[in-house]
Structure formats: C-alpha cells, structure tokens
Image: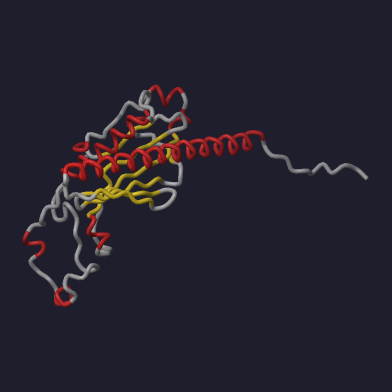
C-alpha cells in the first residue's frame, strides 16, 4: 500500500505565532500575579502598622485587612474601603496610548502586553448595609509587563501618574508608595452632599422602605462633576 500523502501538518508561522503568544501571555500573567501578591503582603503589613499605631496612641480608628480570594483583597479604614483586584486576562496597550510612543516599546512590541491591577474606593457603609446601588470609584490601575516594568493610570489628585514605563520596575518600595498614595487620596476624597434640587423629591415607595438600600444611590461625588473623570 502507498503512503498517505494527505497527513495534515501545522504551518510553521501559525505554530510559532500561537506558541509564542501563549508563552508571552503566561509570562505576563505570572509576573502580574507575583506583583499582586507583593501588593497583598505590603498592604497587609502597612495596615498592621497603622493598627499598632492606633493602639499605641489610643486612637479610635479601625484598620482592617481582608482577603477576598486569589485575585482580590480589601482594606477598610475611617469609613472607606480600598479594593485591590487583579484582572485575570492579559491586555495589549492600545496603539494610540502615550506609552506606545516610547523607544522602550518600539524596541520590543511584546513589552506592550500587560496584566492589570485595579484599585477601587468604596464607602464602607455600602458593604455593611448591602447598599447594592451605591457607587465606587476606580482611583488607579497598575499595568505590569513581562519585565516587571509598570505604569499607572489614575486620578491626578492621587499623584499616581507614573509615565516612565522604560525605567519603572516593580519592587517593595514602589508598591508601598502606591498603596500609601491610594490611602492618602482616599482619606482626602470626602463624601459630599449632592445638590438639594437633585434629592428633594422622594417617592412614596422609597419613604415606606426607609430609604431602602436598593432605592437610593450614595457615592462620594454623586450629583457633582468630578474634574479628574475628564482627564
């Protein structure tokens, strides 16, 4: 019998593309997870220091750290919650992003593939009273690539706009600085009452339910224009 000449073979270009892209994304994921664990351990230690200082000085301020799974943890202090969340997917930076114009990326385009760690601010009462419609705010997100280089997008008031992607490398000091900046910004980001005309009308249903948690929305800047949202 003659040999079967119809055996399917993988195209080298396709095989190389799939294998190289998969390995790249796995590397970026692993680096991002390692970075997230550094955020977790650093934040836990920092909150512990705050807690010890409160006891030492007799301050009535609660600092609590809570693990919420492999990709999420939170800290609660002074009526606020900071929620740190690692996205499980790997992203490529958009072509029109400022970072893509740097020689660092042009030298190696695979450096533009990043994992993402998001930092959100919520009111502690939103969780305590299960006010599902309350609003939280993303105050920053950290992007990390295969070489542990990172940059941050965030509110200008937070002082978290790091643009030196080519030189900024994740380490203990940089992570601590980011967490401290997030705590400082959250502390200064106060809850403001919305304009009177926007809340002067309340439905019978809302009043009967004693301002039910699913009826009214609370957020730190509800009804106000938050300048940083346009930056």
As drawn, is 94 to the left or to the right of 110?
A: left
User: Which residue is rendered at x = 34% and y = 43% of the image?
Assistant: 44
Specify the color scheme.
secondary structure
Q: In the rendered image of this protein, does residue 73 appear above or below residue 143? A: below
Q: In the rendered image of this protein, does residue 56 appear above or below residue 166? A: below
Q: Quadrant of residue 230?
A: top left
The quadrant of the picture occupied by the N terminus is: top right
Residue at the limit of the structure toward the right, as seen here: 1
User: Which residue is rendered at x = 69% and y = 39% of the image?
Assistant: 10
Q: Position of residue 27 (x, y in %)?
A: 51, 36
Q: How many marks?
A: 0
Q: Position of residue 71 (x, y in %)?
A: 42, 48
**Camera-side residue of 111 and 86:** 86
**Camera-side residue of 120 and 67:** 67
User: Which residue is rendered at x = 17% and y = 42% of the image?
Assistant: 57
As drawn, is 41 to the left or to the right of 22?
A: left
Q: In the rendered image of this protein, does residue 170 appear above or below residue 220? A: above
**Camera-side residue of 3 and 178:** 178
As drawn, is 192 to the left or to the right of 8?
A: left
As drawn, is 159 to the left or to the right of 142?
A: left
Q: Position of residue 82 (x, y in %)?
A: 28, 48
- Judge whether residue 230 can be spotted in this image: no
**Camera-side residue of 88 and 10:** 88
Q: Quadrant of residue 195?
A: bottom left
- Judge whether residue 48 can be spotted in this image: yes
The quadrant of the picture occupied by the C terminus is: top left
């Amino acid at each position: 019998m003659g040999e079967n000449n119809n055996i399917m073979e993988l195209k080298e270009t396709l095989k190389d593309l799939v294998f190289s892209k998969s390995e790249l994304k796995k590397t970026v994921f692993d680096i991002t997870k390692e970075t997230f664990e550094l955020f977790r351990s650093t934040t836990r230690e920092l909150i512990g220091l705050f807690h010890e200082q409160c006891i030492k000085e007799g301050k009535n301020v609660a600092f609590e750290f809570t693990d919420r799974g492999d990709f999420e943890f939170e800290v609660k202090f002074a009526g606020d919650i900071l929620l740190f969340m690692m996205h499980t997917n790997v992203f490529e930076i958009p072509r029109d992003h400022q970072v893509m114009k740097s020689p660092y990326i042009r030298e190696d385009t695979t450096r533009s593939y990043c994992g993402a760690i998001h930092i959100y601010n919520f009111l502690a009462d939103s969780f305590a009273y299960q006010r599902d419609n309350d609003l939280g705010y993303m105050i920053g997100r950290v992007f990390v690539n295969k070489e542990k280089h990172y940059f941050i997008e965030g509110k200008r008031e937070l002082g978290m706009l790091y643009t030196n992607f080519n030189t900024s490398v994740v380490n203990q000091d940089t992570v601590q600085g980011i967490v401290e900046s997030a705590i400082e910004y959250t502390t200064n980001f106060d809850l403001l009452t919305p304009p009177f005309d926007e809340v002067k009308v309340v439905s019978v249903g809302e009043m009967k339910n004693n301002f039910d948690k699913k009826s009214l929305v609370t957020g730190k800047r509800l009804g106000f224009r938050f300048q940083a949202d346009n930056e």
